[in-house]
Each structure stands twice: as structure tokens, then as C-alpha cells.
Amino acid sequence: MYLGRVVGRVWATVKAPGLETQRMLVVQPLTPELEPTGKQLICTDATGAGAGEIVYWCGGKESSFPFLPAEVPTNTTIVGIVDEIDVRRPE
């Protein structure tokens, strides 16, 4: 799983079958120190996350598992909203 921040949402009037009821959000990947890293991506949302929230997301086949038994054609999904981060680096 990876950290990210919700920075926007996607509106689509026509979606692939299986995506009709799914929210799609724009996520900026983050480091554990909450610094932006990599390109923004589109994630389906299994949590009800909102703008500006820190989330964790997964990719690949596992990203469709939160929606079972529905078959959602997704490659990235938000699976949790982060309440707190405690980063301890070895000295």
C-alpha cells in the first residue's frame, strides 16, 4: 500500500460497465514525510475520502477486491483514510 493525498475528483458522464457507481479521485502519491513523489493518478474510492485527506491506496489486481462481489475494472483504489503518521528514522 502507498500513501497519497486527495487533490481532486473525476467526473465522467459515460463509464465502463462496473464503474457506473464508483467515485474516482485524483491522488498525489506521498513519501512517509508527506512530500509529493511521482505523478498524480486516478483511484476508485472504497472509503468515502474527501479533498485534502491523506489516504492509503493499493494497485494491481488487489485494487478490485474492496468491491467484491462486484467486478470493478480498476487498477488503483483508495482503501483507507490515514488518521495519524509517526515516522521514526534510525539514527
Image: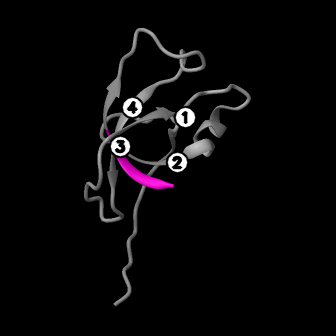
Q: Amino acid at mark 4?
A: Leu
Q: Pointer 1: what residue?
A: 46
Q: Position of residue 14 (x, y in %)?
A: 45, 10
Q: Quadrant of residue 27?
A: top left
Q: Quadrant of the C terminus?
A: bottom left
Cα distance in 3D space between marks 3 and 4: 11 Å
Q: Position of residue 52 (x, y in %)?
A: 30, 40
Cα distance in 3D space between marks 1 and 3: 14 Å
Q: Relative to 45, is 17 on the left or the right?
A: right
Mark number displayed over residue 10 = none
Q: Among all residues in the image, which is located at the extreme top?
A: 13
Q: Main secondary structure of the magenta part?
A: strand
- Is 5 inside the magenta-drawn segment? yes
Q: Among all residues in the image, which is located at the extreme right?
A: 69
Cα distance in 3D space between marks 2 and 3: 16 Å
Q: Amino acid at mark 3?
A: Glu
Along the line of sight, the residue nearer the viewer: 88 or 35: 35
| Chain part drawn in magenta | 1-6
Q: Amino acid at mark 1?
A: Ala
Q: Position of residue 20 (x, y in %)?
A: 54, 15
Please tell me whether mark 1 sits on a helix, a strand or a loop.
loop
- Identity of the residue drawn at 38% across and 86% down: 90
Cα distance in 3D space between marks 4 and 1: 11 Å
Badge 4 crowding class, 10 Å Cα cut-off, few under 14, some 14 to 19, many 20 or more, is many
Please tell me whether mark 2 sits on a helix, a strand or a loop.
strand
Q: Pointer 4: what residue?
A: 25
**Mark 2 or 1, nearer chain start:** 1
- Identity of the residue drawn at 35% across and 43% down: 53
Report if the CB atoms under discs 2 and 3 are less than 8 Å apart.
no
74 in relation to 37, above or below = above
Q: Amino acid at mark 2?
A: Cys
Q: Pointer 3: what residue?
A: 53
